[in-house]
Image (spheres, grey):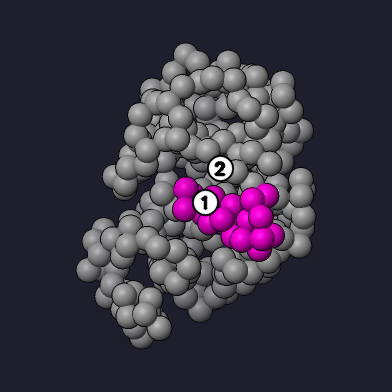
């Protein structure tokens, strides 16, 4: 089956890494190439992630898709800034050929701007401009971390994107393969329905929502006051609620999520320490290494040698 991943400038690198890892591991577990993955960019040129990591596309044109089964748009902030004229035609032809159209984070806005989400339910990006709010006005908002609705797959970034792709793999091919990949990537319980993951477990639905927001923004950590505002709480109320239920502050929960993901990337990918630091929202490799060693008792490079 054929997957096309279209990257827009400022795309989240963790989402890109997760998608590649899911495809690579599914093929390895099957012992054959179950899925192909072709990269394109909205500019037709090498495109930089929000962290400045540049990825070169495999194709630079918008020729007819060769039997795509899944077309994914992955974008960060300002997703509509540099859209090419050929993109809508490409997506329409893919849809007519039976492909599922997917949008992750800003990619959701791109699909909506192309009138491809009208009347559908979708996971909206966490942060929207006024123009984007208008664009998504005819798209019902899903509160889950990913959503599949009549040929449309939408999700937030990072872990949620990995879960979304695994759910698609389970739907179109083999749920056992999806579960095995989930186990290898340390994603925890395989989720086929978009249910938000809880790390650590939160019975409080408000805190579960907090963790879902955090998990969707590991590479670009959201300010705690913005998270509190989205939960309709003051930062003080959120801290009190989080300490009582989880025994940690929201900041500590967030750091734990980021470091847990960093450990998985260190162990299971070939990303450099600098790239892992950027993918998990650290401002510098040195700050990342200090936090990582404090949590796990070993520096990233030392752990990779174990």
Residues 72 and 260: in front is: 72
Give the extent of the magenta segment.
15-34
When asked about the image quadrant of residue 115, the answer is top right
Provide the major secondary structure of the magenta segment.
Answer: helix
Which residue occupies 73% across, 33% down? 151
Which residue occupies 34% across, 74% down? 300
Query: Residue 251: image x %, image y %?
Result: 40, 66
The answer to whether 295 appears left or right of 245 in the picture is left
Viewer-side label of 1, 2: 2
Q: Label 2: how many residues lie within 10 Å, few (<14), some (14-19) or many (20+)?
A: some
When asked about the image quadrant of residue 267, the answer is bottom left
Which residue occupies 63% across, 27% down? 66
Labels 1 and 2: the sequence-earlier one: 1
Q: Is residue 267 visible?
A: yes
Write down the residue under mark 2: 37
CB contact under 8 Å: marks 1 and 2? yes
Q: Secondary structure at mark 1?
A: helix
Which residue occupies 36% across, 85% down? 297
Q: Is residue 137 visible?
A: no
Which residue is the extreme one toward the bottom? 297
Q: Secondary structure at mark 2?
A: strand
Residue at mark 1 to residue at mark 2: CA–CA distance? 8 Å
Write down the residue under mark 1: 20
Query: Residue 232: image x %, image y %?
Result: 53, 50
Q: Quadrant of the N terminus?
A: top right
Q: Is residue 5 magenta?
A: no
């Amino acid at each position: 089956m054929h997957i096309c991943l279209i990257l827009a400038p400022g795309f989240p690198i963790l989402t890109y890494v997760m998608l590649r890892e899911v495809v690579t591991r599914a093929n390895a577990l099957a012992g054959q190439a179950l899925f192909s993955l072709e990269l394109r960019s909205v500019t037709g040129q090498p495109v930089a992630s929000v962290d400045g990591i540049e990825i070169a596309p495999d194709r630079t044109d918008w020729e007819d898709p060769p039997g795509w089964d899944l077309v994914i748009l992955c974008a960060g902030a300002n997703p509509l800034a540099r859209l090419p004229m050929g993109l809508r035609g490409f997506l329409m032809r893919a849809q007519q050929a039976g492909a599922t159209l997917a949008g992750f984070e800003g990619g959701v806005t791109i699909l909506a701007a192309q009138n491809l989400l009208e009347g559908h339910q979708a996971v909206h990006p966490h942060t929207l401009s006024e123009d984007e709010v208008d664009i998504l006005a005819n798209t019902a908002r899903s509160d889950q971390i990913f959503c599949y609705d009549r040929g449309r797959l939408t999700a937030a970034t990072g872990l949620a994107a990995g879960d979304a792709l695994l759910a698609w793999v389970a739907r179109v091919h083999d749920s056992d393969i999806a579960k095995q990949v989930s186990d290898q990537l340390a994603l925890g319980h395989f989720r086929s329905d978009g249910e938000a993951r809880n790390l650590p477990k939160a019975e409080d639905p408000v805190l579960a929502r907090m963790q879902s927001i955090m998990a969707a923004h590991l590479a670009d950590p959201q300010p705690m006051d913005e998270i509190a505002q989205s939960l309709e709480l003051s930062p003080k109320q959120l801290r009190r609620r989080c300490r009582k239920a989880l025994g940690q502050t929201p900041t500590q929960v967030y750091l734990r999520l980021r470091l847990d993901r960093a450990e998985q990337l260190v162990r299971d990918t070939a990303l450099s320490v600098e790239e892992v630091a950027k993918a998990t929202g650290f401002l510098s490799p040195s700050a990342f290494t200090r936090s990582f060693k404090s949590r796990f008792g070993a520096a990233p490079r030392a752990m990779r040698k174990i």
